[in-house]
Image: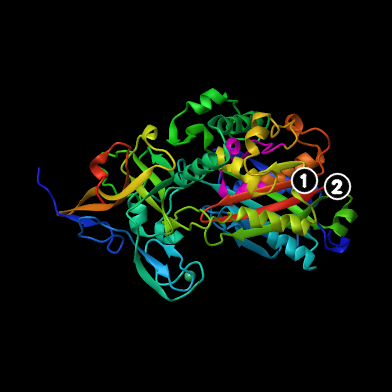
């Protein structure tokens, strides 16, 4: 059931620092820029903000932004929660707003990664040294093995993976803040370097840099300010359950257990009082093309195996029945981990407002859905709606 | 070229020395769940009554990929040593679990989900006066009777 009016939280401002590589620009500088844009978009000032939450994986403490924005004494929570960092900032801020602790809040996420695949000391991730030493602690292996099995079980073709990546580059070309803005043919993607079969080089996203911010308000405050609200109907975060196939698993149970995306999506829809059939646009985790395919079904947006026909028919394109990753997703935007989840929210707000420019989906979308997934088995989903 | 004595990369992963090494997992007395490597508690039911359990040496390939590029550290291959691509997969051991392992095969054309696989060991690199080894699975190809015994 929808919450009573007093409990509803709205997104009233959004800002993004372009994703890509920005030599000489600090992560905090990008974050400050995104926050200033979000404040301007909402028509409020930093001095009015009563609560803030910021997230980054590798680029320090986001509350450092107050040094430039203003030392107002605002409570500021720093979050470092991998792919669920953005969702964690939204949880913190929306909880504060619902509890009556604040009427206006800011969330921000950013990162500035080195080039190349992510790597980390094994002990920090609960992984044994011998496992990493023999060359098994690589997330691309996991994603490749997961989609390899999925293709076998559900009849997904290699051509579908190439189509997903081609769509990402095509949508990215229409997105002025995307990292990769050059369309790429399916043939070029399919014939690029085979990184980990069945996934080729251009089916993967790469770590980069960027920042996203948003201003959240109680419904009452949004009405007082006279701005068009996009309601944050739900945020749900889940870690893995025993038996799901996850990164760095030395063995996996014969009892097939769904990944954390599934319970996170179920919780997000339940909280929002909506179902997957209500969704008009979706932003799904696409660290590689296979993740988007599997995510469509893991979230309940379609049945397992239905992706093959949906994608081959173009139904996930901007003008299809279920547009997915309308801003080019991770493949075209790259992956500043701390900004991922909020970028999906940023794109959803733009689309629901009808402000997505050349990549605007037609037919006045009402409900948007977002999903992130990442190591070591964490997923977060949101439902956003115009009403 | 001298032949170095071999040593597992980590003790307790597989029986060694042995003519036919076996992976050492553990089995929960409470819920019968089997995991690899052996643990002292059950990750499924959190039970503490867990015993070592030797795993089957034959199974089927459940999924796979190829590690085609040289990983960054903490990959342990010494820098001066040449990197050879290797296969990685999960091998389903009937009624037990699915174990992730290196594969002896790194040619996509010679790997397929469902094919029979058998446990072996592979050399990793030299460590002092030993050659480190780890567990791996090798495909059993049809018509290959070198594995017929067992
Ligand atoms: Zn148990």
Q: Quadrant of the N terminus of chain A?
A: bottom right
**Residue A326 is inside the magenta segment:** yes
Q: Nearer the viewer, residue A8 or B21?
A: B21
Side (left or right) of B129 relative to B77: left
- What number is the disc on residue B2? none
**Residue named by callout 1:** A277
Question: Taking A152 as reference, is A72 above or below it?
Answer: below
Residue A251, given in percent of the width and then of the height, sits at 43, 57
Check chain identity for marks 2 and 1: say if they share one: yes
Number of labels in the image equals: 2
Residue B148, given in percent of the width and then of the height, sits at 26, 45
**Residue named by callout 2:** A228
Residue A94, given in percent of the width and then of the height, sits at 74, 60
- The reply to whether dot 2 and dot 1 touch (C-beta < 8 Å) is no
Residue A41, given in percent of the width and then of the height, sits at 78, 45
What secondary structure is marked by label 2?
A: loop
């Amino acid at each position: 059931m929808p919450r009573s009016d007093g409990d509803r939280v709205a997104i009233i401002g959004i800002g993004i620092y372009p994703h890509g590589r920005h030599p000489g620009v600090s992560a905090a500088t990008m974050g400050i820029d995104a926050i200033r844009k979000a404040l301007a978009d909402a028509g409020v000032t930093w001095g009015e903000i009563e609560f803030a939450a910021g997230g980054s994986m590798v680029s320090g403490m986001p509350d450092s932004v107050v040094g430039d924005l203003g030392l107002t004494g605002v409570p500021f929570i720093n979050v470092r929660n991998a792919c669920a960092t953005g969702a964690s900032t939204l949880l913190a801020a929306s909880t504060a707003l619902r509890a009556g602790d604040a009427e206006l809040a800011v969330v921000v996420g950013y990162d500035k990664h080195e080039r190349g695949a992510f790597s980390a000391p094994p002990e920090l991730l609960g992984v044994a040294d011998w496992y990493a030493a023999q060359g098994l602690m690589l997330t691309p292996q996991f994603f490749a093995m997961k989609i390899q099995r999925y293709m076998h079980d559900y009849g997904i073709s290699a051509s579908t993976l190439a189509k997903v990546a081609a769509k990402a580059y095509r949508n990215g070309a229409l997105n002025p803040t995307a990292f990769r803005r050059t369309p790429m043919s399916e043939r070029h993607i399919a014939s690029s370097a085979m990184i980990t079969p069945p996934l080729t080089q251009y089916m993967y996203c790469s770590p980069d840099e960027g920042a996203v911010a948003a201003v959240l308000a109680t419904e009452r405050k949004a009405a007082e300010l006279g701005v068009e609200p996009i309601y944050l109907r739900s945020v749900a975060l889940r870690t893995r359950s025993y038996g799901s196939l996850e990164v760095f698993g030395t063995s996996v149970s014969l009892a097939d257990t769904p990944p954390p995306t599934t319970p996170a999506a179920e919780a997000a829809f339940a909280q929002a009082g909506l179902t997957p059939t209500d969704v008009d646009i979706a932003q799904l985790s696409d660290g590689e093309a296979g993740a988007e395919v599997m995510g469509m079904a893991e979230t309940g947006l379609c049945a397992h195996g239905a992706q093959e026909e949906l994608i081959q028919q173009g139904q996930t394109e901007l003008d299809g029945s279920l547009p997915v990753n309308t801003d080019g997703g991770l493949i075209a935007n790259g992956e500043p981990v701390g900004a991922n989840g909020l970028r999906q929210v940023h794109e959803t707000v733009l689309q629901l407002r009808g402000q997505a420019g050349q990549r605007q989906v037609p037919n006045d979308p009402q409900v948007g859905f977002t999903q992130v997934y990442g190591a070591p088995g964490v997923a977060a989903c949101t439902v956003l709606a115009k009403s | 070229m001298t032949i170095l004595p071999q040593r597992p990369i980590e003790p307790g992963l597989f029986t060694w020395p042995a003519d036919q090494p076996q992976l050492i997992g553990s089995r929960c007395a409470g819920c019968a769940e089997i995991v690899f490597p052996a643990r002292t508690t059950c990750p499924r039911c959190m039970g503490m009554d867990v015993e070592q359990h030797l795993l089957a040496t034959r199974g089927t390939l459940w999924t796979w990929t190829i590690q085609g590029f040289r990983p960054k550290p903490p990959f342990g291959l010494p820098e001066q040593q040449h990197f050879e691509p290797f296969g990685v997969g999960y091998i389903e051991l009937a009624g037990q679990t699915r174990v992730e392992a290196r594969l002896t095969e790194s040619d996509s054309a010679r790997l397929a989900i469902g094919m029979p696989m058998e446990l072996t060991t592979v050399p990793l690199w030299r460590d002092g006066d030993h050659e480190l080894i780890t567990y791996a699975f090798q495909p059993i190809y049809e018509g290959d009777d070198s594995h017929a015994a067992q």
